[in-house]
Amino acid sequence: MLLIACPWCGPRDEAEFHYGGQAHVAYPEDPAALSDEEWARYLFFRDNPEGLFAERWSHTAGCRRWFNAVRDTATNEIHAVYRAGEPRPVIA
Amino acid sequence: MSERSERTGGAAAQPHRREGASGRVLRFRFDGREYEGLEGDTLASALLANGVRAVASSIRLGRPRGVYAAGSEEPNALVQIEEPFPEPMLQATTVELYDGLVATGLPGQGRLADRPDPARYDAVHAHCDVLVVGAGPAGIAAAGVAARAGARVILADERPEPGGSLLGTAETLDGRPGREWAAEEVAALAALPEVRVLRRTTVLGHYDDNHVIAVERRTNHLGAAAPADVARERVWRIRAGRVVLATGGHERFVAFAGNDLPGVMLAGAARTYANHYRVLPGRRAVVFTTNDSAYAAALDLADAGVEIAAIADVRQAPGEAWAARCAERGLEVLTGHVVTAAKGEGEVSSVEVASREGGQAREIPADLLLVSGGWTPVVHLFSQAGGTLRYDEELGAFTPGETRQAVEAAGFARGVRTLRACLEDGAEAGRRALAAAGFAVPAGPAVPSGTAVPSAGEEPAAAPAEHLWLVEAPGDGGDYGTHFVDLQRDVTVGEVLRAVGAGLTSVEHVKRYTTAGTAHDQGKTSGLLTGGVVAHALGVDVAELGTTTFRAPYTPVSFAALAGRDRGPLHDPVRVTAMHEWHVARGALFENVGQWKRPWYYPRRGEGPGEDPGEDMEAAVLRECRAAREDVAAMDASTLGKIDVVGPDAAVLLDRLYTNMMSTLKVGSIRYGVMCRPDGMVFDDGTVIRLADDRFLVTTTTGNAAAVLDWMEEWLQTEWPDLRVCCTSVTEQWATVALVGPRSREVLARLAPGLAVDNDSFPFMTWRDAEVAGIEARVCRISFSGELAYEINVSSWSGLALWEAVMASGEVTPYGTETMHVLRAEKGFPIVGQDTDGTVTPQDLGMEWIVSKKKADFVGKRSFARADTSRPDRKHLVGLLPEDPGVLLPEGAHLVETSALPEPPVPTLGFVTSSYRSAALGRTFALALVSGGRERVGERLYAPVGADLVPVTVTSHVLYDPEGARRDG
């Protein structure tokens, strides 16, 4: 079980969190202006890298805040956590 | 019967017990026979003391098998405990003997208990600076350094007493038996305030971020004497700052003909039986070794009284010190020799030995064959934790390499050989753990032991081992058919060679092809041997072949232990409403809706004994439905999810999440709404009540309340943080009574004399605050049945009082969820999650009207312009009337176009989502999702039910009062 450092509460067991998939996929500014393909990309397509991945987590059983984390999907190491709305940090 | 002594000299009752063994006599049964053992025995040592050689039989070939090892690596001696409580698939080597134990040997598979387990199981969460796994020399040294500097330390060991390898080797420390040293040292550590010593505790799994799962066996060893108030087993969930794995090693065997016969045993295990358990596993032994360690075993056994007939060493040059000692004792050492076969009927009676250079084999009579193919560090946990392994040429085994976790191995677990070096290595690991945890690292002796540095006995310089996996004498069949590599899975060299011959070149593939290493011993003694044989067959190096993946659990764990207290009523929280006790008293049957217990229906009880059996479900539901349609009835609707949505931008949020417009709702009014996901599929529905310009009360379906709150918060936090809105669950703050039926207005008027209830003063889809039965209430005119209806909401504290007031006159019929379902289905109102499944749009449900054309956007809107959501063959919600009005379709039944089924695959048009008997319609009916359903109204379709094709007619989904004439009373 991962130990996840909630930016608001500090390190907590993974069981307190809810996973939210890829981060930085914004709801389109004007969905009506998108082609079917562009809308389908927003709805159905997500990255699935081996390595660093920016993803969303919610501290459901804690402060109930959504935040983002950069996790290495090969090792499960979490390199950074940051609040929703902040830019993805650069990991060396 | 004569008085038995509580002390025994190991007399005739235990013919293989060594002289001078002492302890309380314990009586047990095995395979139907009575035996005696001694306190401190395992079932395995007690059986060996009684001369029992064949303990179990093998899973595939049914070959007799005996005790092979002395710990949790045992591949052979699988037993089932029958009394005091049945438990399958235990290793005789880890079952501690107790009085009254009844066990049987297993043919590789056990039987589950046929009665409920009366024992309790529990779980503990713990945190520590340093977790040390294994209380052998290295583990005790590591824990000692860390604990004495004040770190919070957990020391866990799977055995009943500390000491690890010291228990079997009879080595001395500070001139004392190692076993005593270990016991004193661990007792001293346990007395420190921040130290927890866990005996009989197996660390099963090592997961991310040093999360470690262990199982502590607290009362298993007490048998029937186990106190009922102590949990039998306890799962430890430990988060450790740093982990030191001092897990030692397992001896492995060599593949030769007949290496599974009872009487063949690992040399180190035989040494443990002789030294620790005071048992002689045989009378006359041949020793077969690739390394020096078996010499110590041979000498200890010779001291104990076993005749050592010969030592066959594959090497030309064993360690000089060992050779000298053997010469002193007159033991014959055959260098450059191998055992080509163990022979005997059902157990070893002779051993065939031959020079590796050829020549005549020699057959030596013996009842015991001790084997040492070298020692394998126990790297399971290190590997589970994500560590890499590297091959140690000298050891002929894999040792820990790199890891990103805060874990290190110490002692033999990382290949450190001598006792002295293991003690020092453990102490160093303890120092590193201290430094990592931020403690001051103490100066002082390398190895703490209270007063002095222990001198770790005399350890002769070792000669290098030779790594021999396979004796190339193919046996009687000529096919390597009794050269076993995995004893528990009955996998032989012959099968491994076939796998390699079939083109498999990876150990992972060979493992899956032959099943070697997949038994419940996790291949502890066989994994590396299998790899060695594969490497031999391929002509490659074991190092480049690698190992198979190590996975938790290290040893088998019972489901009961993992479940702990989370069983029965504690498995999941049970939620009940404020009126629950009334429903129970009234004899309601309950339905689980999410975690809620909801009254399902209220059967009328039979009057008097025998003659009147009372109502069945069908009769009760028809009666409840009639009351709601023709008279007045009430339901406890408290479980509906309720969310308070407050803030200046509350209306904006709801406009974006619901398909219809909520901002135009007037204070005092109510609107039904549907929420979709961005893909346009229905997610939830319910009513929205406007309490003030900046305040709404949203209701959700019972099962979806938490998901809808999560949904609102997710959008607010991740997409629209600029909106000033707060969402709060108030589901449990309110109790709700739905008062339904043509006479509901009359009943409400009586209960709330201050409330104007006429249709003009209190129209449909509005709410009023009022006093109902003297209780402050909010009354909503909402109908989920099509009838004139009210939902009366009061504080949960007053829920029962309100319900009792509604029921007091005796004229209101209570109804449950089944009647609610029938009433709403007659009206074609869908239930999200029953009539929908995440692939259904509002349009599919016939609710085009609820999808706003005016709003620029809302969640889901763009998807309604996708080609997929306007396909003419989408499944629509329709009604179905079976042509025989008495036939009730099963929910889930499929629908086909033809009156006879074509060859499979049968094209289906859809399926039944809801199906009931209707009092109002006087017949059965159903709702269904049917491809292009709205264009099929009037068509005949067929539902395959069993062998029959039931003809049905497609109708509108609204079957009752389609004009909506009844809602105003």
Image (spheres, grey):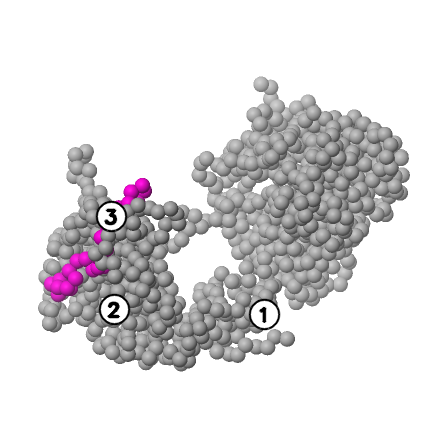
Assess whether residue B965 is covered by the magenta stretch.
yes
Q: Position of residue B560 (x, y in %)?
A: 49, 45
Please name the residue shown 67% across and 34% down the image.
B67
Q: Give the CA separation, mark 3 to mark 1.
A: 57 Å
Which of labels 3 and 1 is toward the front?
3
Q: Position of residue B495 (x, y in %)?
A: 67, 40
Front position among marks 2 and 3: 3
Disc 1 residue type (three-letter): Leu
**Parent chain of label 2:** B
Q: Which of these two is toward me, B964 or B497?
A: B497
Q: Position of residue B341 (x, y in %)?
A: 76, 32
* Label 3 Cα crowd, 10 Å radius (few <14 / some 14-19 / many 20+): many
Residue tagged 2: B672
Q: Element type at marker 2?
A: strand
Q: Give the magenta range.
A: B945-969
Q: Secondary structure at mark 1?
A: strand
Marks 2 and 1, how far apart at CA: 44 Å
Q: Amino acid at mark 2?
A: Tyr
Residue bearing the label numbered 1? A52
**Residue B876, image quadrant:** bottom left
Residue shown at the point (58%, 27%) measured from the top left? B31
Q: Is residue B506 visible?
A: yes
Count of picture labels: 3
Give the number of the disc on residue B951: 3
Q: Chain of mark 3?
A: B
